[in-house]
Every structure is written in structure tokens, then in C-alpha cells.
Image (tube, rainbow, N blue to C red):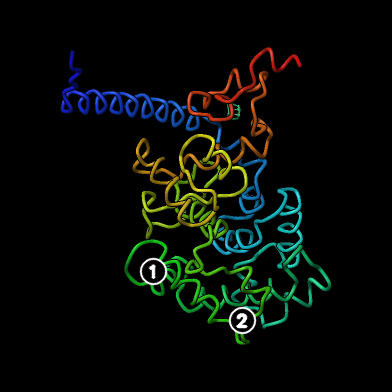
Amino acid sequence: MSCCIDPSSAWSSLATRSRSAELRRQAALAQLRDALLATDRAALAARDPIAEVRCLPQAEWEVAAHLVGAFCYGAVPQIRKTARHLFDAMDGAPTHFARTMRRGELRDRLGDFRYRMTAADDLDRLAFSLGSLHRSHGSLEAAFVATGGEGEIIARLGGYVEAIRGCSPEPLSRGFAYLTPHPASGSAIKRWLLLLRWLVRPDDGADLGLWRAVDCAELIIPLDTHTSRLSRALGLTSRTTVDLQMAREVTAQLATVAPLDPVALDMPLCHLGIARDCLHRYAEAICEGCALRPLCGWAAAKPSRANRKK
Ligand code: SF4
């Protein structure tokens, strides 16, 4: 007896299976979106570096966000402490201070202050450059529009970064380059993408809603340790290198369920890790009630009961 499989019917059954797997995945992604969007963002903001910006009068937010965004690396309490120290040195009015300062004035006020890779002189250079751009264009948003040119968001950001660097009178130093990474490097440029999220997304008690010149749909997720690891576990990317390409892939996946504002999902994802509401491994007490579980590779790989008893 010969065994003949009709190739066209085999392909169609495979296609049906992969279509239904994709539908299940989309349903799980939509569930993830709804769970994340239900998070109280103002409550998250109270535990986030953005809280230090929001403490200031609204007229200060744009410059203040640029400064805090630039040194938003390391542990949240240290970032917040640095922001408070910096704003105190700027008399609580970073916009006015940056617009009117002489080069070196902030460095002199900060003295031997240092935050990890960032020295007082690096902050002085950044504040001086932002102040120059603010004076020339009337706002940093207008400077972004004027210096970014046309093209997609990363190309425009590249032009803006060059303009900021170009306002500093001295050659680019290592510390200033670290505060103003160039998107052409291909790195995840988390701090710039976080700043754009703060400036562009509507004021929801966390993000600031200051810039109208960029559309929320253009934003790219600012990947940090937590969000990159979670993104891999949730199947939003298969890349292992945390770079701009990974950020684009994750954003594209989020956009399948939140096309107008994919980066709205960033803050709750990020705070899952910061607040240790996700331990990046299966933990029965947490994972059994987690809304992300249907997509989570860590939960899928949970040890069997027998193995857990060993
Ligand atoms: S199921 Fe567990 S490991 Fe997975 S995202 Fe939720 S808390 Fe984290």
C-alpha cells in the first residue's frame, strides 16, 4: 500500500496551525497590553526619577527632564539624589540657570560632586549647551525640530544630539560624550529614548506631554536591564544583544496591540523589575497571579513540583 500525502493539504494544515498559534499569541499580547495599561502610572511615577522633575514648576520641566534623562543610569535612589543636588545648585530653576549661566558656573557650584561616570564639569557642559539651544530657539522642542531635519525619529535625534554637542565650546570629552550618546552608535540609547517618552507622551501623572512635534507612534522603547530581559522572556524579541535593533523589534511587537502608543507599555514593564514584582524567574507566589504569565518563558519553564521538592 502506498502512502501518499497530498502536499497541498499538508501545507494548508501547517498554515492553519501557525495562524491559530499567531491568533493565540495576539490574544495573549492584547491581555498583556490591557494589564499594563491598567497600572496606576502616577503611583509608579512617585517612585521614579521623573518625580524629581515633576516637583519643579512646569516651566522648568523641559530642561530639567533633559538633565535627569542624561544621567538616568544606575539605581533609582541615587539618580533622584543626584537630581535634587543638581537642581539645588541651579537655585531650583534649571531653565533660567541654564539660559543665563557662564561656562563653568555650575561646575563651581557642584564642587567635587561626581555621580559614577559623570563629573561636575560634564553636567556643566550639558546645562550650558541646553541653555544655549534654549536661548537660540525659544525652547528645546523648537531646537529639536530645527536641528533634527526630516526623516525617522532616530535620524532626527541624531541631528539634535550633534547640535547639543556642538554648543559646547571645547572638544568632546569622554564624560560629555557619555551624557550625550550618539544614536549612530547602534546602542540602545536608553536615556535618550526615555527622555523622548517623558517629553512626548501625554501628561498622565508620569510622562510630561510637553512636545507636540513628535508623534507617540514614532517612539521607540527605552530598553534597560529589566525591560530587555522581560522582553526576551515574553517573546517580544529573540535578540540577545541589547541594542537599538532590539528596541525596534520590541517596539514593533508592542505596536501590534498598541499601534498609536506602543511605548505606553514601557513604564509598567520596567517597574515590574524595579519593584521586584517580577524576579526574572518562576516564583510561585508572584507568577501564579501575574497577568503576563501566558506569554512568559520563565513561567513556562517552571520546575516541576517533583523537582521543586528536591
Ligand atoms: S510570570 Fe513570573 S517570571 Fe513571568 S513576568 Fe510574571 S512575575 Fe515575571
Residue 157 located left or right of residue 227: left
Return the residue nearer the eye: 242 or 164: 242
Residue 125 placement (x, y as % from top left): 65, 77
Up the image or down, 131 lies above or below 45; here it is below
Location of ligand 1 given as a quarter of the image: top right
Instruction: Identify the image quadrant of residue 252.
Output: top left
Q: Residues within 10 Å of mark 1 (few under 14, many from 20)?
A: some
Mark number, residue 172: 2
Residue 158 placement (x, y as % from top left): 45, 70
Mark number, residue 162: none
Return the residue nearer the eye: 47 or 239: 239
The residue under label 1 is which amino acid type?
Val
The residue under label 2 is which amino acid type?
Leu
**Lower position in the chain sequence, tag 2 or tag 1:** 1
Residue 56 placement (x, y as % from top left): 64, 55
Residue drawn at 76 percent across, 61 percent down:
85
Residue 19 located left or right of residue 306: left
Residue 70 placement (x, y as % from top left): 62, 63
Q: Quadrant of the C terminus?
A: top right
Establish whether ligand 1 lies closer than 8 Å to the Cβ of label 1: no
Mark number, residue 145: 1
